[in-house]
Amino acid sequence: MPLLADWLLRHSVVMCLLLHSLVLMTFCFHHAATSCSKSCYCSQSEAGGKTVRCSNLRLTEIPHDIPNDTRRLYLDFNLLTGVPANAFLQLRLLKELDLSHNELAQLEPGAFKGLAGSLQFLDLSSNKLMTLNSEAFEGVHARANLTHNPWHCDCNLQNVMPHMSLEPASLAGIVCQTADPEDSRAQGSPFLLDKDLDLCAVLRKTTDVAMLVTMFGWFTMVISYLVYYVRHNQEDARRHLEYLKSLPSKQGKSEESSTISTVV
Ligand SMILES: *[C@@H]1O[C@H](CO)[C@@H](O)[C@H](O)[C@H]1NC(C)=O
Ligand SMILES: *[C@@H]1O[C@H](CO)[C@@H](O)[C@H](O)[C@H]1NC(C)=O
């Protein structure tokens, strides 16, 4: 027994090292076989093509080494704050893109460029999106999940809606959390292409009022000037009249009457 214990003690270090390298090797082979992007997990199926999963990795930016034959890409539950231009340009076969449960607040123009021909489903739910930029979706006709975002419904968003290339039904996911004007009953309701709800009307009304005030201002100035001008001339005329009165000639009298008629 003491002999065995002694042997074990002496060889434990070696055994440990062996075991360690074995584990490392297994891990490496496993890594090589199932991952294609440095940090993500890849799988391939006959029917579905390549799927890349980068979920829940605390990613703050989109990995640059996503294989170009990826058909499904999962980037959900990360810390992405925006999608830069041309982020998925190489992924010509991408059918499904999941960006849900991130911190996305901004989609830059051209963010989904290159996906117009292939993308069928785009998940942008549970993010921090307040408004949309139609230039980000240029030509992308995908069905999108836009729910669970703090949408701010205003004239700007209303103007963007008709230019969105996404499947129209997707826009039902835009539920206003805040609205401008606040009392527009848009809050808490889906902001579809609602004909009754016109968030630009108040803006137009404000512009009209501003125009009216400006015009009134000009009008007042012109009237004031006219009044001043008439008063001033009346004073002159009166002085002229008094001077003429002081002249005893008949000619002066006739001139006087003509001056009065001119003034009046
Ligand atoms: C992916 O890239 C390789 C090499 O650049 C190219 O040969 C291949 O055609 C590309 N595949 C797709 C689907 O774009
Ligand atoms: C959209 O996303 C929300 C939250 O992420 C989820 O609960 C819902 O089922 C999704 N809807 C569709 C149609 O995928």
Image: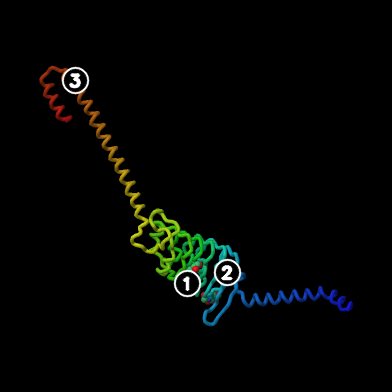
Distance (Cα) linking label 3 and label 1: 94 Å
Amino acid type for the residue under numbered disc 3: Tyr
Is disc 3 placed on a helix, strand or loop?
helix
In-front residue for pair 177/31: 177
Q: Could you tell me if the residues under marks 1 and 2 are in contact, i.e. CB atoms within 8 Å?
A: no
Specify the farthest residue to the bottom: 46
Specify the farthest residue to the right: 2
Q: Is residue 11 above or below residue 59?
A: below
Residue 70 x/y as whole percent: 54, 74
Write down the residue under mark 1.
Answer: 121
Write down the residue under mark 3.
Answer: 243
Ligand 2 within 8 A of label 1's CB?
no
**Quadrant in which the C terminus is drawn:** top left
Distance (Cα) linking label 1 and label 2: 17 Å
Q: Earlier in the sequence, mark 3 or mark 1?
A: 1
Q: Could you tell me if the residues under marks 2 and 3 are in contact, i.e. CB atoms within 8 Å?
A: no
Ligand 2 within 8 A of label 2's CB?
no
Who's the residue at 62% across and 76% down the image? 34
Distance (Cα) linking label 2 and label 3: 100 Å
Is disc 2 placed on a helix, strand or loop?
loop
Residue 22 x/y as whole percent: 73, 77
Q: How is the image coloured?
A: rainbow
Who's the residue at 53% across and 65% down the image? 101
**Which marked residue is nearer to the observer: mark 2 or mark 3?**
2
Q: Report which quarter residue 196 is drawn in.
A: bottom left
Write down the residue under mark 2.
Answer: 55
